[in-house]
Amino acid sequence: MVATQASTAKHKGLKRRATVIYRRDGEILFVRKRRSKWNLPGGRVERGETPLQAAKREMAEETGLSFDRLAYVSQYRQDNVVHFLFEARRTSSKKPRPLNEIDDCRWISRKDMGKRNVREPIRDLLKRCASDL
């Protein structure tokens, strides 16, 4: 399936998630819900929505940032979740701010990820799909 096409196929038992890797000066933007571990921005792909539309919507809902373009990186399956990965590079000086269920936004470097409480599946995902970090 192409990430820009709406998905009508049902994936039994699989969750579909649009995930965004947003880079700035060697760091990646992470978000955190209250009393949760750090995660990449993103969320569920809604019915009738493309993964690209979901990625843009989730970034706006969680961080207040909007992007005209997100680059499709890959599709990655982990346990019962299919991640549609997109990448954004910093193009404006607008700062991310926590919105809705998000309690905090933070830029974290690769070397500091070990010091932060980043979800283990996200660490694995970044190792596999963003190895140039």
Image (cartoon, rainbow, N blue to C red):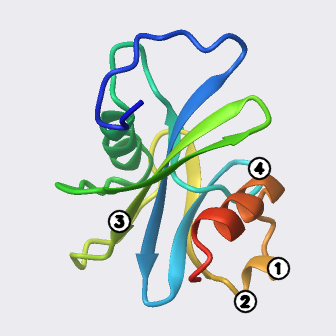
Q: Is residue 127 above or below residue 74?
A: below
Q: Does dot 2 land on a helix, a strand or a loop?
A: loop
Q: Position of residue 83 (x, y in %)?
A: 58, 41
In front of the other: 125 or 95? 125
Alpha carbon distance from label 4 to label 2: 21 Å
Alpha carbon distance from label 3 to label 4: 24 Å
Q: What's the amino acid at mark 3?
A: Ala
Disc number for residue 114: 1
User: Is the Cβ of the residue at disc 1 closer than 8 Å to that at disc 4?
Assistant: no
Q: Does dot 4 land on a helix, a strand or a loop?
A: loop
Q: Earlier in the sequence, mark 4 or mark 2?
A: 4
Q: What's the amino acid at mark 4?
A: Ser
In front of the other: 40 or 133? 133
Q: Which residue corresponds to the image point at 64% horizontal and 24% vertical from the top-left?
A: 15
Q: Quadrant of residue 24?
A: bottom left
User: Is the Cβ of the residue at disc 2 closer than 8 Å to that at disc 3?
Assistant: no
Q: Earlier in the sequence, mark 1 or mark 4?
A: 4
Q: Nearer the viewer, mark 1 or mark 3?
A: 3
Q: Residues within 10 Å of mark 4 (few under 14, many from 20)?
A: few
Q: Which residue is mark 4?
A: 36
Disc number for residue 88: 3
